[in-house]
Amino acid sequence: MVNIYPNPTNDIINLEFDLEEFNDLKLEIINSHGQVVYNSKLHSDRFYNEIINISGYSKGIYYIKISNSELIHISKVIIF
């Protein structure tokens, strides 16, 4: 299960999930124009937790995409 909070937000995004079943994950934040504005490779032995500072992002709808060769998870986040 992927937890992304708070939503809506204006300063940070907390991202949490269990990596036990997955490896080689990539995290992307994509704006409403389809541009990748943030990306990183996820490294953890099990539980993953990251706080992402989005205070410099423009207001709007963004998508958090977590993916590898076996999985694609997309969540919508509103930045105000």
Image (tube, helix red, strand yellow):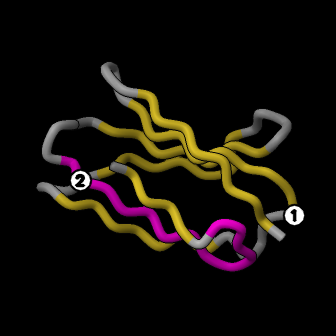
- Image-quadrant location for residue 6: bottom right
Q: Nearer the viewer, residue 32 or 36?
A: 32
- SS type, badge 2: strand
Give the left or right position of residue 20, taking residue 78 as reference: left
Query: Residue 40 appears at what percent x and percent y?
Result: 45, 50
Q: Earlier in the sequence, mark 1 or mark 2?
A: 2
**Mark 1 to mark 2 CA distance (whole Å):** 29 Å
Residue lying at the far top in this picture: please name it: 69
Query: Residue 73 appears at what percent x and percent y?
Result: 47, 35
Magenta residues span 7-19
Query: Residue 26 appears at what percent x and percent y?
Result: 41, 40
Q: How many numbered discs?
A: 2
Residue 18 circle label: 2
Residue 59 circle label: 1
Question: Mark 1 belongs to which amino acid?
Answer: Lys
Asked if residue 22 is positioned above or below residue 7 in the image, the reply reads above
- SS type, badge 1: loop
- Image-quadrant location for residue 5: bottom right
- Residue name at image x 80 percent, y 51 percent: 61
Q: Mark 1 and mark 2 in contact? Answer it, CB < 8 Å.
A: no
Question: Mark 2 belongs to which amino acid?
Answer: Asp
